[in-house]
Amino acid sequence: MKILACDLNPQQTYRLITGIVVPRPIAWVCSRSLDGVLNLAPFSAFTFVSNKPPMLGINIGRKAGVRKDTGRNIHETGEYVVHIGDEALVEPIHESAVEHPPQISEVELLGLAVTPSDHIGVPRLVAPPIAMECRLHQAMSFGDTGAEFIVGEVLAFHIRDGLVHEGKIDSMELNPICRLAGPNYATLGRTITLRTLAQTDKSLMPGSVRL
């Protein structure tokens, strides 16, 4: 089967590509409007882009050419919190994807507890095992629909006790949920552990000259 990208409209492309790029981690983003309304929404086009300083990238689309509440809030305040939810939070994460008017707070609607952040004005959720306080670094628009790739610097990590071992997150203990196509989610399931690959010292390769 062959499908030409030029024959697809944005909605058809979205349905296709979200079934191809799987599984996807979910950034559960809490932001605050200039009026003080807390917005909460999940985004699965999400990754990290830098480790010094730590930076996260999230693709946030537009609706009818207009920024969604999360995108608008981040542009206006420059602050937001990215949470990583576990399996116990899959239902509120799913419900927070419902679009509401800007004056409606998904945090209040879902009855989620918050606590003040340490470095930004946007509070963080209490329930998720991981929360990352972020400050907007850069926003770049891509494509015809005006979707933006928003990059933020992580100022602080809040991690549930017991998840970090020797500086690394215990992924199985974290038990994060990920997004598939449509209203479908998955957990880590079976993992495959391979031996650590040794890094080649190029200075010792044949023909190399050590200075």
Image (spheres, rainbow, N blue to C red):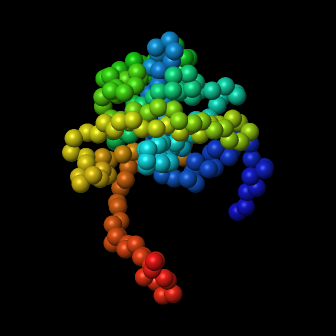
Q: Is residue 38 above or below residue 62?
A: above
> Could you tell me residue 9's position as x and y percent?
74, 42
Q: Is residue 83 above or below residue 172?
A: above
Q: Residue furthest front?
A: 211
Say if 69 sits above or below 15 in the image.
Answer: above
Going 62% across and 45% down the picture, which residue do you hit?
Answer: 15
Question: Picture coordinates of residue 1 (x, y %)?
Answer: 70, 63
Point 76% across, 55% down: residue: 4
Q: Quadrant of the C terminus?
A: bottom left
Q: Position of residue 18 (x, y in %)?
A: 58, 48
User: Which residue is nearer to you in this view: 16 or 154?
Assistant: 154
Is 89 left, or right, of 8 in this rendering?
left
Q: Position of residue 160 (x, y in %)?
A: 26, 39
- At 47% across and 32% down in the image, what residue appears? 135
- Seen from this angle, which residue lies furthest right? 7
* 78 or 194: nearer the viewer: 78
Residue 101, by quadrant, is: top right
